[in-house]
Image (cartoon, helix red, strand yellow):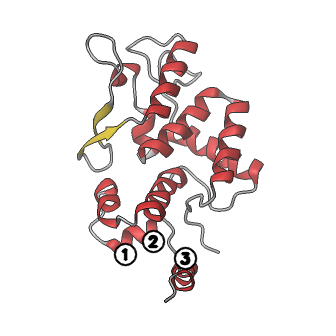
Amino acid sequence: MNKRTQPIKNRKKINEIFAYLRGKNERDYMIAKMQLNTALRISDVLKFKVSDFLLEDGKFRKSLDLEEKKTKKKKLIAINDPLLTSIKQYIASNNLKPDDYLFRSRKGINQPITTTQAHRIFQDVAQALHIENFGTHSLRKTWGYFCYTETKNIALIMEVYNHTSEKVTLRYIGITQRDIDKMYYNIQF
């Protein structure tokens, strides 16, 4: 059995994940929502501070400007309206200040949760909802899977992931022989 994390290919299952997390812990729900809407690695999501989302005048940014932790590459990510609304509500309901980490740990003062803790959260989701091969990369991959199925623009998805090969990107987002077969059955002349 392949232990590599896989994307979620079903919107109903995504909604189940969100509902489960929201019912358990708003912070954990927001981590998942942030990752699914930005396609960032969990290590990049966890390092956000409230100030990363604010302009100097206190208004909210429409995009994030960051350096990826793993690759050290600069990235500009547009923040879609549903995510921005959720971020605003989350910050307000938790009385977070500009210097606060968005996803604070219960340990220490103003420390972000660790990637290990995020892994535990995602493993809890997998166990509770009976999802195989689900982990901290699954929602990042899910974003790519849905982008591909809706746009077929592999070049832009490769750019987002910093991949140099279409084959690598297709494998990463979980495009399988079954998906290819389905395409052959659906395109008829």
Q: Is residue 103 visible?
A: no
Q: Is residue 66 left or right of residue 96?
A: left
Quarter of the figure with residue 134: bottom right
Q: Can you give x and y, in whole percent of width and height, for residue 128 in the image?
A: 77, 48
Residue visible at 57% across and 22% down? 107
Between tags 1 and 3, which lies in front? 3
Q: Is residue 36 visible?
A: yes
Mark 3 is on which residue type?
Asp
Alpha carbons under labels 1 and 3: distance apart: 14 Å
Mark 2 is on which residue type?
Arg
Numbered disc 2: secondary structure: helix
Give the answer, above or below, for where 179 lies relative to 92.
below
* Dot label at residue 167: 1
Instruction: Give neighbour class at mark 1: few <14, some 14-19, many 20+ (Cα, 10 Å).
Output: few
Residue visible at 28% across and 50% down? 71
The quarter in which the N terminus is drawn is bottom right
Near-viewer residue (110 or 148): 148
* Dot label at residue 179: 3
Alpha carbons under labels 1 and 2: distance apart: 6 Å
Mark 1 is on which residue type?
Lys
Give the answer, above or below, for where 161 lies relative to 56.
below
Q: Can you give x and y, in whole percent of width and height, for residue 175 in the image?
A: 50, 72
Q: Which residue was labeled with disc 2?
A: 171
Judged from this view, the residue extending furthest toward the front is: 189
Instruction: Give neighbour class at mark 3: few <14, some 14-19, many 20+ (Cα, 10 Å).
Output: few
